[in-house]
């Protein structure tokens, strides 16, 4: 038990705030709570140790691989898998601690991958990286629920993202749309939702929050085939889904560093709008974009739009007080601007710059009203980025540009100074 808590209890006893019986009950309660929680440090080192053991065995075998016969190679290929299965089975049967389950699950995850790779190499079984990753993920998916393992779930999402990138991007072996990625990620969602319900503010849950948002952001590009300009619309809708998810009660009441949906949704939308603020981008969209609704990209964009809109309606229904947050509606505005841009690139460019400025000013106002310096400076940064980007479009002298930069920097300093001074006055 933490020494600070014990000192506080002793102080309360000395001052007759609580009785000895109450102090004993409090101490017993926190002691039982502490004993019921797995040691996080042991869990981390257990997972790390299992990973190192698995990799070490692979390296030892690989060093002497060429000197072994095929039958001995086959035995060695299955030894790590058998050991990992026995340890995992023991953890389940004996109902061992979570440290055991996380460690054995991680070991078994890598043992399965190593066995698949070794057997394929020994018997010259043809294949490619995509099919190898697919088989590996399918065989290890049940471990999430058999061992109740967070580590395996994280590894599944990471390797599923790798699988999607391998299939979907140009550096992949056949540039296919990785639809099975969605199946793999959806298979991990029940485990994540359980974590979200039982321990929403735990560090492990925060890791999953960031993992899912980053994975979807990276992988979405793999679903873009021929109609790449619509990819801008797809990403705008995805960031709309993220930001509105972040406004759900389960996420909104958390610290910002834990709410990856709000962070990625907001930053992603701003970066996307900055890219679209250049007229040359809209010129390319005007020439190359196809509005056929039966294209893969347009179907995905429509599905994401419907999902974002439904989440927006749900969040607004749950809000007690009427409030307006422009960031929640960015996906709607970008959808309108995109269809305008198909017909007129100049109008779309102007509208994009206007909405960026309004977003920046909106963030500045929110930051000033709530005395949140991070939000205030975020709004100032958005406005500054618009001004800087326009330097590349407008032909003005370097002296004028220099003066504008000085003015922007002074504006940052002055705004923060005024708000800090006002905050100090209110705290008196």
Image (spheres, rainbow, N blue to C red):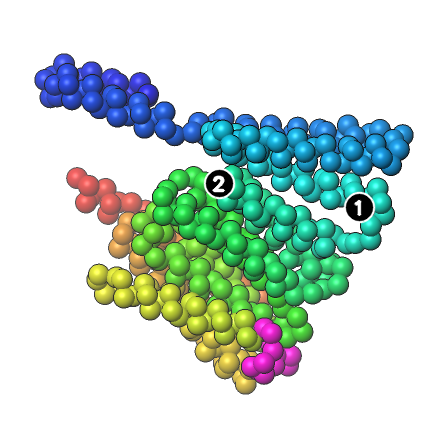
Taking depth in this image into account, of 383 and 241 the one nearest to the observer is 241
Q: Percent from the top left, x then y, of residue 152?
A: 56, 42
Q: Quadrant of the N terminus?
A: top left
Residue drawn at (61%, 45%) of the image: 140
Image side of residue 253 versus residue 51, left or right: left
Taking depth in this image into account, of 421 and 66 the one nearest to the observer is 66
The answer to which of marks 1 and 2 sits earlier in the sequence is 1
Residue 322 quadrant: bottom left
Q: Percent from the top left, x then y, of residue 290?
A: 61, 81
Residue drawn at (76%, 59%) of the image: 173
Q: Which residue is mark 2?
A: 148
Q: Which residue is mark 1?
A: 120
Based on the picture, tell me whether residue 105 belongs to the magenta stretch. Answer: no
Q: For label 2, count other residues whose C-alpha is less than 10 Å away and answer few (under 14), some (14-19) or many (20+).
A: some
Residue drawn at (29%, 21%) of the image: 4
Q: Tell me how far mark 1 sits from mark 2, CA to CA.
A: 30 Å
Circle 1 SS class: helix
Circle 2 SS class: loop
Image side of residue 240 versus residue 171, left or right: left
Magenta extent:
283-297
Residue drawn at (41%, 45%) of the image: 195
Residue 130 quadrant: bottom right
């Amino acid at each position: 038990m933490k020494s600070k808590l014990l000192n506080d209890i002793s102080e309360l006893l000395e001052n007759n705030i609580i009785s000895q019986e109450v102090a004993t009950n409090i101490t017993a309660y926190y002691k039982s709570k502490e004993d019921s929680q797995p040691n996080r440090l042991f869990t981390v080192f257990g997972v790390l140790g299992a990973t190192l053991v698995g990799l070490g065995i692979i390296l030892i075998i690989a060093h002497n691989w060429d000197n072994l016969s095929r039958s001995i190679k086959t035995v060695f290929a299955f030894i790590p898998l058998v050991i990992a299965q026995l340890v995992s089975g023991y953890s389940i049967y004996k109902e061992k601690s979570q440290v055991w389950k996380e460690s054995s699950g991680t070991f078994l995850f890598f043992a399965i991958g190593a066995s698949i790779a070794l057997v394929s190499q020994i018997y010259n079984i043809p294949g490619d990286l995509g099919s190898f990753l697919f088989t590996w993920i399918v065989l290890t998916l049940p471990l999430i629920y058999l061992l109740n393992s967070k580590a395996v779930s994280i590894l599944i999402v990471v390797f599923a993202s790798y699988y999607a990138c391998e299939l979907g991007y140009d550096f992949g072996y056949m540039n296919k749309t990785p639809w099975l990625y969605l199946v793999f990620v959806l298979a991990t969602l029940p485990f994540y939702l359980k974590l979200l319900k039982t321990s929403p503010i735990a560090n492990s849950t925060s890791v999953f929050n960031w993992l899912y948002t980053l994975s979807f952001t990276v992988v979405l590009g793999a679903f873009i085939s021929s109609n790449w300009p619509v990819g801008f619309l797809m990403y705008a809708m995805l960031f709309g889904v993220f930001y509105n998810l972040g406004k759900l009660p389960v996420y909104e009441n958390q610290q910002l560093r834990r709410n990856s949906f709000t962070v990625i949704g907001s930053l992603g939308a701003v970066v996307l709008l900055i890219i679209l603020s250049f007229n040359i981008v809209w010129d390319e969209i005007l020439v190359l974009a196809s509005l056929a609704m039966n294209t893969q990209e347009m179907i995905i964009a429509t599905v994401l739009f419907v999902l974002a809109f439904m989440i927006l309606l749900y969040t607004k229904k749950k809000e007690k007080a009427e409030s307006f947050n422009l960031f929640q509606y960015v996906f709607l505005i970008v959808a309108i601007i995109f269809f305008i841009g198909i017909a007129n690139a100049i109008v779309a460019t102007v509208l994009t710059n206007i909405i960026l400025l309004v977003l920046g000013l909106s963030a500045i106002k929110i930051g000033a009203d709530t005395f949140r310096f991070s939000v205030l400076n975020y709004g100032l940064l958005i406005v500054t980025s618009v001004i800087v980007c326009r330097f590349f479009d407008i032909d003005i002298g370097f002296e004028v540009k220099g003066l504008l930069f000085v003015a922007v920097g002074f504006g940052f300093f002055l705004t923060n100074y005024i708000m800090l001074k006002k905050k100090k006055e209110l705290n008196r």
